[in-house]
Image (tube, rainbow, N blue to C red):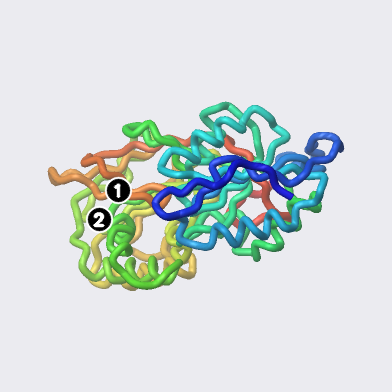
């Protein structure tokens, strides 16, 4: 049984503008019992807030139905649908007053980023659960190793999840929080090209990436890590972040973990056969290729030094601004996420 306002219609999509509720009981608020030095068990979930994007590239309605149908009567579930960019960040901030709240982001990597940013900027401590409702779902792959969504749902309600703090980052020129990572070059251009391709999900992104790789012109670039030049060369792609996965298929930062307080950077220089390192990225071996320069630090600047603007993206969204330089700084242990045990290999050791 759900309570809420009658759904509104926006752009032909019926969007509940109010909250859908599963009945709540009177058991105590969630608690976190320490199980390791840096991981805590998430017990006795009482309130779940779902922030869902109806325009996500996957199946947000189906994933939400699973979450709602499995909710026990002792758990209150509030559902908020976004209607445009920035909504997820605003809604997440509004619900960030209680550390006992679990926020579920039902959308793509861009929606997940907005939710994470809202929680962080509000100074809140809710635990974030990521649902695979987008196209690439790289955040879900990193945190949950692509486990079936039904397993995540039951683990949430069965108090089988654990809390872990992960890093975020800020893109200084944009004053924007970054979760997944950022890229300049092929990956950014592939996101643009994917819009004109048929198909859905990761296969469309994969096709776009390989198509773009064959035609992308290298640019003269420079990457600076913690004030020291890491590389100056003809570059095809640069990736910065904590998440090792991009487009749900490529491990462009294979040595990265999401909770070490550092950013990884991977540079693909121009080379005779760029398909070779691209294929290695699908097995996590790209850092071993001679055309790849790999680094790590707390503040990383990516520049194009031939007078042209960088094509730049972060968290799956291409930045419309025309800039030749972006600086990204880590925000260590800035977000609590609910994750399985054992942890995926995207986490460091305790």
Question: Residue 74, how many percent across, how many down?
Answer: 82, 44
Q: Residues within 10 Å of mark 1 (few under 14, many from 20)?
A: many
Nearest to N terminus: mark 1 or mark 2: 2
Q: Is residue 282 visible?
A: yes
> Which residue is nearer to you in this view: 150 or 187?
150
Residue at the image point whose x is 57% and y is 30% from the top: 94
Please, which residue is most extreme toward the front here? 6
Residue at the image point whose x is 54% and y is 38% from the top: 261
> Which residue is nearer to you in this view: 30 or 59?
59
Q: Residues within 10 Å of mark 2 (few under 14, many from 20)?
A: many
Q: Provide the residue designation for mark 2.
A: 235
Question: Residue 196, how many percent across, how many down?
Answer: 28, 66
Q: Is residue 43 visible?
A: no
Q: Quadrant of residue 125?
A: top right
Q: Quadrant of residue 185?
A: bottom left
- Of the numbered discs in the image, which one, if any, rests on residue 328? none
> Which residue is nearer to you in this view: 153 or 182?
153
Q: Provide the residue designation for mark 1.
A: 312
Q: Is residue 121 left or right of residue 223?
A: right
Look at the image and tell me in which quarter the C terminus lies: top right
Please, which residue is most extreme toward the right here? 27
Q: Is residue 218 above or below residue 282?
A: above
Question: Residue 300, how many percent across, how many down?
Answer: 37, 39
Q: Is residue 228 left or right of residue 305?
A: right
Q: Is residue 282 left or right of residue 6?
A: left
Q: Is residue 334 above or below residue 61?
A: above
Question: Residue 126, how many percent across, how many down?
Answer: 65, 36
């Amino acid at each position: 049984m759900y309570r809420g306002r009658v759904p509104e219609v926006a752009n032909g999509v019926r969007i509940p503008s109010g909250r859908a509720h599963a009945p709540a009981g009177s058991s105590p608020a969630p608690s976190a019992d320490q199980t390791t030095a840096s991981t805590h068990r998430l017990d006795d979930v009482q309130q779940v807030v779902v922030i869902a994007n109806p325009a996500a590239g996957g199946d947000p309605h189906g994933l939400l139905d699973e979450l709602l149908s499995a909710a026990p009567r002792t758990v209150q579930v509030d559902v908020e649908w976004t209607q445009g960019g920035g909504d997820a960040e605003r809604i997440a901030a509004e619900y960030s007053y209680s550390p006992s709240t679990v926020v579920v982001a039902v959308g793509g990597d861009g929606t997940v980023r907005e939710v994470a940013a809202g929680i962080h900027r509000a100074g809140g401590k809710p635990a974030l659960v990521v649902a695979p409702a987008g196209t690439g779902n790289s955040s879900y792959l990193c945190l949950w190793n692509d486990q079936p969504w039904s397993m995540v749902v039951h683990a949430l309600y069965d108090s089988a999840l654990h809390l872990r703090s992960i890093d975020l980052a800020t893109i200084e020129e944009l004053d924007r929080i970054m979760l997944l990572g950022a890229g300049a070059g092929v990956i950014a251009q592939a996101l643009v090209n994917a819009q004109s391709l048929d198909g859905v999900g990761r296969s469309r992104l994969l096709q776009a990436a390989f198509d773009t790789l064959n035609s992308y012109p290298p640019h003269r670039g420079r990457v600076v890590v913690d004030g020291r030049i890491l590389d100056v060369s003809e570059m095809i792609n640069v990736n910065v972040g904590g998440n090792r996965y991009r487009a749900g298929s490529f491990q462009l930062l294979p040595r990265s973990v999401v909770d070490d307080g550092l950013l990884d950077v991977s540079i693909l220089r121009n080379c005779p056969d760029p398909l070779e390192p691209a294929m290695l990225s699908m097995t996590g071996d790209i850092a071993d290729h001679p055309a790849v320069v790999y680094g790590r630090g707390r503040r990383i600047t990516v520049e194009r030094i031939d007078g042209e603007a960088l094509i730049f993206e972060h968290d799956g969204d291409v930045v419309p601004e025309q800039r030749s330089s972006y600086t990204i700084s880590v925000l260590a242990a800035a977000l609590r996420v609910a994750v399985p045990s054992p942890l995926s290999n995207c986490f460091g050791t305790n």
